[in-house]
Image (cartoon, rainbow, N blue to C red):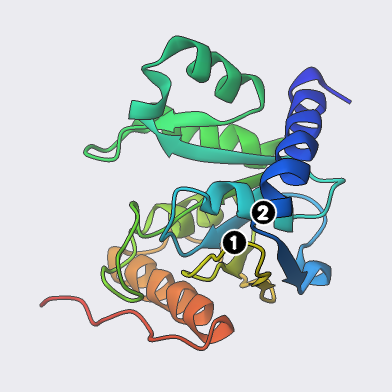
Amino acid sequence: MDFKKFLYTVLRALVMWTYGLLWPFRVYGKENVPEGAAVVCANHTHFSDPFYMAWAIPWKYHLCLMAKRELFKFKPLGALLRGIGTFPVDRGAADLTAMKTALQVLKSGKKLGIFPEGTRTHTDGEVSPKAGAVRLANKAGAPVVPMYIPREKKLFRPIRIVIGEPISVDSDKRLSREDLERISDEVMNKIAELGHTVPVRGRAA
């Protein structure tokens, strides 16, 4: 086991058994997480969603999260995040460094965690997803695994996290912008379906 995965596993357990006692959860569909590389995509409505995404993935896998660059400005936190395999992304620009790091994660056979909406949203279907997750899946030849995390998280009341079946992305050709947007919408619609919520809104012309 490499050091990053070891540290990730230890911290995951510590946070899970403390935070998880107060805001418990149940995971359905763990069997849908495939072996090897995969892009795990979930809706994002609360700061705790990255924790729930990590807890929902089976213990044997190492989930590397793409997180906003602002979190890394506080150096101790940034060092800890990098230590467990989380890496920064500039959400306001085309961050080529983050894309290269993400591809390296997938090429190494690990799981990559992304929130396609790019930011926390106040209501389901509030914004159209960005195409970065599907673009990475296309380049790496990895499937996209949809995950639904409930918006409401109440003290001592279990939430229901649902993992859907992997969505294959054609890796034999470079997808057009239209294809990337279409598949990204399909991914978010699948996530909404898992949670029985409102699908993503149509894109502006």
Q: Which residue is labeled 1 in the image?
A: 155
Q: Nearer the viewer, residue 16 or 203?
A: 16
Residue that appears at 72% across and 58% down? 56
Vertical placement of 156 versus 97: above or below? below
Residue at the spot 37% in from the left edge and 71% down from the top edge = 179
In which quadrant is the C terminus drawn? bottom left
Q: Residue at 26% of width from left, 81% of height from top?
A: 201
Q: Secondary structure at mark 1?
A: loop
**Mark toward the start of the polypeptide (1 vs 2):** 2
The amino acid beneath tag 2 is Leu
Residue carrying label 2: 22
Image-quadrant location for residue 13? top right
Callout 1, which amino acid?
Answer: Leu
Quadrant for the N terminus in the image: top right
| In the displayed structure image, the side of residue 204 where residue 104 appears, left or right | right
Say if mark 1 contacts mark 2, CB within 8 Å.
yes
Relative placement, left or right, of 5 versus 197 is right
Nearest the viewer among 13 and 102 is 13
Instruction: Let me know if residue 110 appears in the view.
Output: no
Based on the displayed image, in which of its 4 quarters is residue 115 positioned? bottom left
Q: Is residue 99 left or right of residue 96?
A: right
Residue lying furthest top in this view? 75
Dot 2 alpha-carbon crowd within 10 angstroms: few under 14, some 14 to 19, many 20 or more: some
Residue drawn at x 43%, y 29% is: 88
Q: Does residue 194 sit above or below 151 in this rendering?
A: below
